[in-house]
């Protein structure tokens, strides 16, 4: 996508940490919706590998996971001809703007961040990167003057900080940044663990049968869904309080087929869980097989992935330099002699 295309479309930006495999919950809850954004917004999708090092990482795995993440997102439909796809570490400006923003950000506001407090409780030694993570996130967003940002429940507080910092910079110096809004698109499916349906599906689930990975083979997907926890009642109906396992499977089936929960209940009235699970497995496999096949082609083509990252970084860099130059001038830094 060329950054020379004059477009009145609003800018949307979202980043994802390179954490290895994506799962069915990621796809149905968010990634599938991102595809529709590409026609309505000027899209920046980046791999936030700088955020990833707030927790210890094996360097070789982090490097490989950047490619895995890119290939999976492209397999899900993110198109480098429509959107700018890039790695955070390839663009100068994220950390530079984060430093400027950190100088107007009250320390107490960062210490009150719920995510920081939760993570700090779990670690013996807390690094300052974990504390300043939300400032870097704010810089990610403001560097591209995003109008809207898709955020999950755990990131809403960080977006509020971004809005606060944008408003504070604008009032301290002069209007510079858009004050971004949260993106509220079509509600994505809330997918729970197949083995513990009271918790969200997660790659960190110790029970691997609880999570369907996007690149699982058809046989593995079928095994996981057929072994999903249910109940002893035997009726296919939604009741999240008393039948969380079956309710979760109904939600998944509805998300991949477009059927309503009521239609599913009517279709499987009087039928057993085995028949229902088989249909859920068939529908999920039909949805994920094309994704897996595209991923397997993409991950083998490192040259194409490198070229995609290179082109995306070139577009992103031009935008970042324009923003950074404006910010530096406003805070009083002399113009760089070229």
Image (cartoon, grey):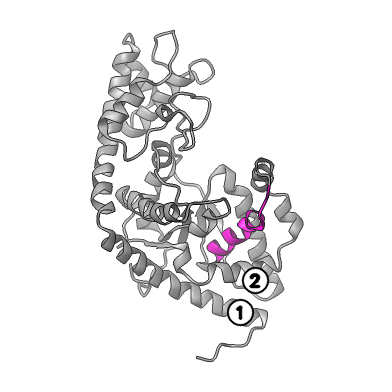
Q: In which quarter of the image is residue 260?
A: top left
Q: Position of residue 163 (x, y in %)?
A: 63, 59
Q: Where is residue 28 in the image (x, y as percent from the top left)?
A: 40, 39
Examine the structure image and report whether residue 298 is included in the region drawn in magenta: no
In the image, residue 32 sits, relative to residue 282, either above or below, namely: below
Q: Mark 2 points at which residue?
A: 100
Q: Residues within 10 Å of mark 2 (few under 14, many from 20)?
A: some
What is the magenta range? Answer: 125-142
In the image, residue 121 sits, relative to residue 282, either above or below, namely: below
Secondary structure under badge 2?
helix
Examine the structure image and report whether residue 137 is included in the region drawn in magenta: yes
Q: Where is residue 312 in the image (x, y as percent from the top left)?
A: 37, 66
Q: Taking 113 as reference, is 304 left or right?
A: left
Q: Do the residues labelled 1 and 2 touch (CB within 8 Å)?
A: yes
Q: Name the residue under label 1.
A: 328
Q: In which quarter of the image is residue 66?
A: bottom left
């Amino acid at each position: 996508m060329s950054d020379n295309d004059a477009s009145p479309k609003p800018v949307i930006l979202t980043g994802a940490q390179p954490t290895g495999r994506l799962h069915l919950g990621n796809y149905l809850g968010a990634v599938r919706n991102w595809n529709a954004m590409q026609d309505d917004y000027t899209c920046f999708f980046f791999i936030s590998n700088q955020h990833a090092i707030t927790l210890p990482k094996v360097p070789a795995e982090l490097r490989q996971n950047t490619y895995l993440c890119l290939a999976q997102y492209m397999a899900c439909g993110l198109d480098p001809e429509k959107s700018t796809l890039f790695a955070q570490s390839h663009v100068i400006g994220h950390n530079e703007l984060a430093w400027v923003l950190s100088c107007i950000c009250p320390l107490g506001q960062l210490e009150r961040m719920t995510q920081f407090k939760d993570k700090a409780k779990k670690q013996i030694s807390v690094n300052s990167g974990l504390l300043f993570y939300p400032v870097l996130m704010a810089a990610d967003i403001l560097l591209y003057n995003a109008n809207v940002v898709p955020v999950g429940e755990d990131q809403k507080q960080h977006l509020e900080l971004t809005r606060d910092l944008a408003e504070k910079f604008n009032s301290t110096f002069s209007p510079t940044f858009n004050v971004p809004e949260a993106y509220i698109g079509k509600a994505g499916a809330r997918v729970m663990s197949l083995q513990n349906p009271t918790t969200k599906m997660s790659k960190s689930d110790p029970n691997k049968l609880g999570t369907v990975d996007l690149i699982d083979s058809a046989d593995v997907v079928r095994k996981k869904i057929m072994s999903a926890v249910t109940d002893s009642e035997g009726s296919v109906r939604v009741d999240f309080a008393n039948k969380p396992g079956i309710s979760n499977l109904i939600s998944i089936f509805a998300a991949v087929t477009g059927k309503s929960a009521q239609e599913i209940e009517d279709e499987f009235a009087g039928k057993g869980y085995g028949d229902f699970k088989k249909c859920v497995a068939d529908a999920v496999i039909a949805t994920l097989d094309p994704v897996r096949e595209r991923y397997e082609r993409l991950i083998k083509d490192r040259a194409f992935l490198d070229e995609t990252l290179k082109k995306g970084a070139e577009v992103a860099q031009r935008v970042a330099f324009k923003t950074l130059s404006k910010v530096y001038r406003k805070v009083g830094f002399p113009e760089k002699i070229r």
